Amino acid sequence: MTIIRFPNEFAWGAATSSYQIEGAATEDGRSESIWDRFSKTPGKVEDGTNGDVACDHYHRFRDDVALLKSLGIKHYRFSVAWPRVIPTGRGKVNQAGLDFYGRLVDALLEAGIEPYVTLYHWDLPQVLQDEGGWARRPTAEAFVDYSRVVARALGDRVKKWITHNEPWCASMLSYWEGRHAPGLKDYRAALAASHHLLLSHGLAVPVIRAESPGSEVGITLNLTPTEPASPSAADHDAARHFDGYFNRWFLDPLFGHHYPADMVADHIAAGHLPPEGFTEVKPGDLEAIAAKCDFLGINYYNRTVMRSGKVPEAQNEPRTVFLAPEKEWTDMGWEVHANGLRDILTRVHLEYRPRKIYVTENGASYATAPGPDGRVKDEKRLAFLRDHFVAAHRAMESGVPLAGYFVWSLMDNFEWDRGYSQRFGIVWVDYKTQQRIPKDSALWYRGVIAENAVSVP
Ligand code: FCB
């Protein structure tokens, strides 16, 4: 048994998001979000479900805070639902919706748990989508106003802010690949959306700092180390393109570079951008996007191995994603590859030098259900987390300024287009009774936190 110790101040946490857990979809003045609309459109969510009730967290938040406390988790990342706070997208604040988050924050602080607030985890008010959503610049301005409202209300107590969760998903996956709300398949709109998301982040950073003095502000990206499937030039080029599409398109502008020139050229060549280039980018935008942040959040789930060529399953991206077949997979169909976490952390540290990094999400979907004794023996999730913690530790040994790690997710929840079929929680949720049962991985995690160390056989 080897014992791997973490630094004293290391922040062990768990993460959730509003639409995935809250339920109470029409309560206290909450308006429709793009995920309400999308999930109720037949054929969009695999099992035909939606977030109307989810984990009923809106009503059970005190129990959930007690659950966090019982697991020894002292850092909790959650998101605020914009349609609760400003149901009309811009303008009038809905105090009842805002108050919910005030109560949640107070309950967390009382339990000795530090809140990490994500302002946008994909539940855009549908009214803003009706105007074009993130494909249009006024949505970025509306986001800044919404951020000001939330930071003003909670900023005395919340000292960790994340503007956006995974702008790649909120743009490319949602406006181009069509798999997430609003379900469009329009590359130009996706590129515009990516820019307006990043711009809204950059414009919100100083606003949040002003409203929440002494706080730390950052953004969360989902990143995937990308490798070619073979040494061939074609596969290398496929990997370059995918890395540009997924990682560099967001990292480069956030860290003061332009959008990657090779990608702009690819998009012009493919007709996704006009010959003049990325015309949504106005003077001053890139400076705004590159606002200095206190940390970068990284969500890591898997690596990507690219092979060139066109296959029917990958119609949207001209290059094929090809994952090493000999490996192990989670129920999501995602390859288990812990070293990819070390790779991406190290790369981001060396190439972009963020002041500080948090792993704001990492975890695995396994359906393991309670046995006859009521226990959930999710050994695979436990091993997954352990191996990823070790990989993160290795990255820290080589100098990566990793300050904390948030397990996705505190509890099973509504997994977007996969509905309730995928269970990422370290806590089991019985959706009929809303009973929560900490899985073996949660009990093990409690030990990791208590020891601030991971034991590896
Ligand atoms: C991430 C999302 C999170 C969850 C996990 C599995 O992309 O941020 O909400 O769905 O994937």
Image: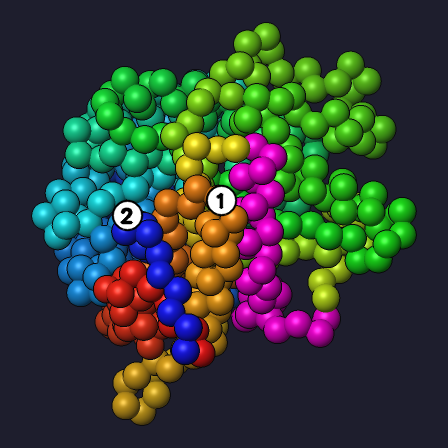
Q: Which residue is mark 1?
A: 399
Identify the residue shown where x is 33% and y is 34%: 161
Q: SS of the residue at dot 2?
A: loop
In the picture provided, is 241 more to the left or to the right than 287? right
Tag nearer the camera, 2 or 1: 1
- Sequence-first disc among 2 and 1: 2
Q: Which quarter of the rendering shows the N terminus?
A: bottom left
For the residue marked with disc 2, what is the amino acid?
A: Glu
Q: Is residue 338 magenta?
A: yes
Q: Position of residue 419 (x, y in %)?
A: 47, 61
For the residue marked with disc 1, what is the amino acid?
A: Gly
Identify the residue shown where x is 69% and y is 42%: 243
Q: CA distance from mark 2 to mark 1?
A: 16 Å
Q: Position of residue 440 (x, y in %)?
A: 33, 77
What is the residue that sits farthest to the top in this orientation? Answer: 283
Q: SS of the residue at dot 1?
A: loop
The colour style of the image is rainbow
Q: Position of residue 99 (x, y in %)?
A: 16, 37
Q: Which residue is mark 2?
A: 9
Identify the residue shown where x is 76% and y is 47%: 239
Q: Nearer the viewer, residue 298 or 436?
A: 298
* Residue range of the region highlighted in magenta in the rendering: 325-352
**Do we see residue 40 in this rendering?**
no
Picture quadrant of residue 6? bottom left
Q: Is residue 234 magenta?
A: no
What is the residue that sits farthest to the left in this orientation? Answer: 110
